[in-house]
């Protein structure tokens, strides 16, 4: 790469004429308004009004009937206030000002994943603990000339797109200008990236974010990075997909979460000076396992999500833990005991990071509060063991989620009601479709 490619030319950027004021809905999708830049100061001070129903829409942006917020209550407004971060350049034609939604009364609206995570973090503060969090973001680059999901084409002389090429330097080099641009854009948004790897399938990549003691910012950074990836990819002639399993026969894309906990003296409470870790670590693991199956809907919120959670790969299907075992849902990585941490491997990249962190950190703290004891760690292929299972499909996940006492206790009943209603509506839409395979199978045979 030439120096001119590696270092962008300095140029004077025109002041933006507008800003996008946006909340994040339950699926992690921005919803909001385009506002004149002249109104930015007022917007920062007063916020903006939007219907409460807008944060609980389904994945297509349709009002969710089950929340009973539209016709039944007159589609009440919530107050959307700046989070204190932004405006941010996420690759759109104007900066994004992130907002969170409260009720007219001033109470948080817990369908807003940001408020849900704040609620969990308040419990950590009361317990004298601070989670230190990092995420791993996996995704595929696609060929925009294809109507389907063909892998992105390499540059002339680049690596063929028929092979997996895991950890390939050629794959990284071929996408080098895209990766360089992405790092610059992430840094400009205050997102600190660590390593990048070519993952286990054609044109699949993983970006690792740095550990930080601000879990709310960690969730924001993960969400914002997905938007930056999508927009930077488009600039470089690619499409980026965050489907959990775009190809049936190749690796899915996960959102792995690493975390440890500090006490009030800044000491890692998972570290007891041994490779096994402390009793508090094992209690956190037990809490995660106790709520994991109930929370599957958060970690796998879409129809496609369950194609990733299937035997035969490194995505988990059972509720278990292990040391340095990537088939386990919860892995305790090796390394210096001072950095002892938990890796939670269940969530796909198609999730809302605020919800994922709320469920993980909430489950871990619940286990610590009750000082639960986990089952023995697994040392072999967890898919082949007789172990408790994650929800096997989307419908079972919804049934468990909306009836589980653990979700109401660890999260919030208001969120449980709204999220379950949105997912029920999405399931109903998919169930009503007559697929090409269905027609081909039954049209002349029955």
Image: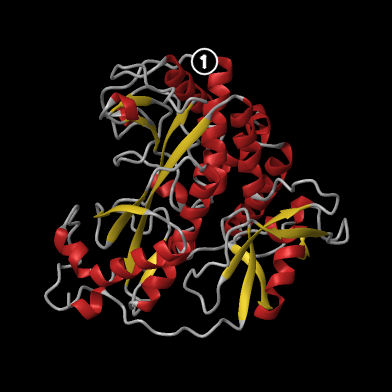
| On screen, residue 83 above or below 177 | above
User: Could you say whether the residue bearing mark 1 is in a helix, strand or loop?
Assistant: loop
Q: In which quarter of the image is residue 69?
A: bottom right
Number of residues whose C-alpha sits closer than 10 Å to that of mark 1, classed few (under 14), some (14–19) or many (20 or more)? some
Residue 144 visible in rendering: yes
| On screen, residue 161 above or below 168 | below
| On screen, residue 372 above or below 359 | above
| On screen, residue 166 above or below 95 | above
Coordinates of residue 172 in the picture (x, y in percent): 21, 62
Q: Which of 14 and 186 is in front in this view?
A: 14
Coordinates of residue 257 in the picture (x, y in percent): 42, 41
Count of marks, rendered view: 1
Q: In which quarter of the image is residue 20?
A: bottom right
Q: Which of 413 and 91 is in front in this view?
A: 91
Residue 60 visible in rendering: no
129 displayed left or right of 76: left
Coordinates of residue 77 in the picture (x, y in percent): 82, 61
Quadrant housing the N terminus: bottom left
Say which residue appears at 64% left-offset and 65% top-offset: 22
Coordinates of residue 236 in the picture (x, y in percent): 33, 77
425 displayed left or right of 168: right
Say which residue appears at 37% left-offset and 30% top-offset: 341
Q: Quadrant of residue 150?
A: bottom left
Write down the residue under mark 1: 372
385 displayed left or right of 57: left
Say which residue appears at 43% left-offset and 21% top-offset: 281
Point out the residue furthest to the left here: 157
């Amino acid at each position: 790469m030439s120096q001119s490619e590696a270092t962008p030319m300095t140029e004077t950027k025109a002041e933006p004429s507008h800003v996008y004021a946006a909340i994040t809905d339950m699926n992690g999708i921005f919803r909001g308004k385009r506002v004149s830049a002249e109104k930015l100061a007022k917007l920062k001070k007063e916020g903006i009004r939007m219907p409460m129903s807008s944060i609980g829409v389904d994945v297509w942006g349709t009002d969710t009937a089950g929340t009973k917020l539209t016709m039944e209550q007159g589609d009440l407004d919530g107050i959307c206030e700046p989070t204190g971060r932004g405006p941010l350049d996420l690759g759109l034609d104007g900066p994004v000002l992130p907002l969170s939604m409260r009720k007219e009364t001033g109470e948080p609206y817990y369908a807003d994943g940001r408020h849900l995570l704040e609620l969990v973090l308040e419990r950590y503060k009361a317990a004298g603990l601070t989670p230190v969090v990092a995420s791993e973001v996996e995704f595929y680059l696609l060929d925009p000339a294809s109507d389907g999901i063909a892998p992105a084409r390499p540059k002339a002389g680049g690596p063929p797109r028929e092979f997996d090429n895991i950890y390939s330097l050629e794959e990284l080099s071929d996408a080098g200008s895209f990766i360089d641009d992405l790092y610059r854009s992430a840094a400009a948004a205050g997102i600190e990236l660590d390593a990048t790897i070519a993952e286990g399938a054609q044109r699949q990549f993983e970006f690792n974010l740095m550990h930080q003691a601000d879990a709310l910012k960690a969730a924001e950074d993960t969400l914002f990075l997905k938007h930056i990836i999508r927009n930077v990819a488009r600039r470089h002639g690619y499409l980026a997909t965050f489907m959990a399993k775009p190809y049936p026969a190749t690796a899915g894309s996960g959102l792995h979460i690493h975390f440890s906990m500090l006490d009030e003296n800044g000491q890692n409470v998972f570290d007891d000076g041994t490779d096994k870790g402390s009793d508090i670590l094992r209690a956190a693991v037990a809490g995660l396992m106790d709520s994991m199956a109930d929370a599957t809907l958060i970690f796998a919120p879409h129809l496609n999500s369950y194609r990733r959670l299937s035997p035969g790969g490194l995505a988990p299907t059972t509720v278990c833990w292990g040391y340095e075992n990537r088939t386990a849902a919860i892995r305790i990585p090796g390394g210096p005991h001072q950095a002892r941490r938990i890796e939670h491997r269940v969530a796909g990249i198609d999730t809302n990071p605020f919800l994922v962190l709320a469920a993980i950190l909430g489950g871990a703290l619940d286990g610590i509060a009750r000082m639960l004891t986990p089952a023995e760690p697994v040392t072999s292929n967890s898919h082949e063991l007789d172990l408790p299972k994650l929800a096997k499909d989307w419908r079972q996940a919804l049934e468990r989620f909306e009836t589980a006492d653990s979700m109401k206790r660890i999260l919030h009943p208001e969120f449980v009601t709204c999220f379950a209603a949105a997912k029920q509506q999405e399931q109903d839409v998919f169930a009503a479709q007559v697929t090409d395979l269905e027609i081909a199978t039954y049209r002349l045979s029955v």
